[in-house]
Amino acid sequence: MRNPMIRTLIGLRGNGRASVYTEPLWGLSMMLVLPYASVFMLALGVHDEHIGLLATISILSQVVFGLLSGVITDKMGRRMTTAVWDIIAWVIPCVIWALAQNFWWFLAAAVINGAWQVTQNSWDCLLVEDVDRREIPRVYSLVKAAGEFSALFAPIAAFLVSGLGLELAVRILYVNAAVIMLIKIWLLWRYSTETATGKIRMEQTKGVSIWRLLREYRGVLGLIVRSKGTIFSLVIAAIVGAVYLVNNTFWQLAINQRLGVPDELLPFFPMVRSLLSLLFYFTLIPLLTRSKHLKTPTLIGFGAYLAGQLMLVATPVPDGGAQLGTYAMLAGCLLLDAFGGGMMFMLAESLVALHVDRLERSRVMAIQRTVVMLATAPFGWISGWLSGMNRSWPFILTSGLLALGLLVAGFLWVTTHDDVDEPVVVE
């Protein structure tokens, strides 16, 4: 089979297969409701500044849970941690969001939802610890593609909003998300096993207190500081994380409130972006990332993502609602975002995974995520403040961040493989 992505998908076994094959259920749960999250808050009286503040509070909560994630993952094991903390981080907040009445409900959900950093750590370990290192970029591409698969079901959300109104429809979608996430959690538990590294770490940490394990982070921190590749990957991940935070919070709000796109059409934009991403993940992106040398693909990804953000800023505000020209500009923006954003998501995750110390993966990745979240946390509040003045300004901010990413990748690149003699996979 010539297509490397399809070959990797079919060839997955064990935990890699269980993790990737259950990922579309994430899309059928949260991805259906995310296009309406900010608009839903606005409809319940939460202002732009408070929406941005909630994004920052969520990140700060993630910082705390992220710092604990390595210890929890090592003591409980990759598989058990993923199951238990997915319920805490997603099912419980979805119920709160479904019942939300004001800012304080969203605040409570944001704090609890921050626990997803624990399961992100354990799930990443479950995903890649038994996978060939050379396959890691493709595996992350498959994860992203699996999540984008939910785009096919976006009309369900649009139909509900059109027929039931925004508020009731979003509450129903949050209930659906809670149920689907429970199904996903059970399936992953049923078809996964604890990794070899996970078993070793569980035995090593048995009977050791959490506080002692946290104190040992000082040694793990040294591993990060001494690795130029790890520092470089952290900078890239922080830039991509900040851009994702702003876009995830304010993109839909901007096209709805600034450009006049009606509520019932909002799900179709992430749907188109997702379908384009799927196309790119199985065609252009594998061609660009087939070599172990990832500098050029990273520069291309940053450049395309930057062009998409600038196009959104340049889209003129129409009189009396979105016009044909508005949708044409947004189509170009979606095309560039799907390609550039898809490239950078995969590459940012892959760079971190490729540079991490293999025997200390869970704790190193916990510290890495904590650092990234601390760096990105202020951008929620800053972008909310900017959006309150002009809803295009948050994307001027993201454009600046992506330009910085181009400079960092262009002039400060560090090789992505310690195994310099590792043979390149020829497709």
Image (spheres, rainbow, N blue to C red):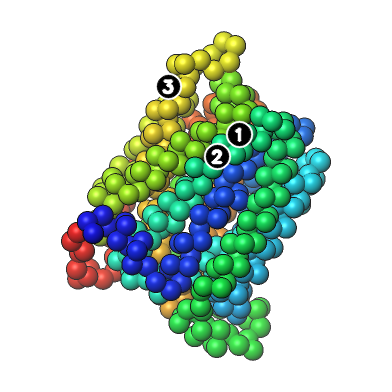
Q: Mark 1 points at which residue?
A: 158
Task: Name the residue type under label 1.
Answer: Ala
Quarter of the figure with residue 64: bottom right
Check the image and report above or below for 256 versus 74. Answer: above
Q: Say whether disc 1 or disc 3 marks the residue closer to the N-terminus.
A: 1
Classify mark 1: helix, strand or loop. Answer: helix
**Residue 54 image offset from top left, x and y in percent:** 69, 44
In the picture, which quadrant includes the N terminus? bottom left
SS class of the residue under badge 3? helix
Residue type indicated by callout 3: Ala
Please tell me whether residue 224 is drawn above or below residue 273 in the rendered image: below
Residue at which label 3 appears:
328
Mark closer to the chain start, 3 or 2: 2
Label 2 SS: helix
Q: Mark 2 points at which residue?
A: 154
Query: Foreground residue, 34 or 192?
Result: 192
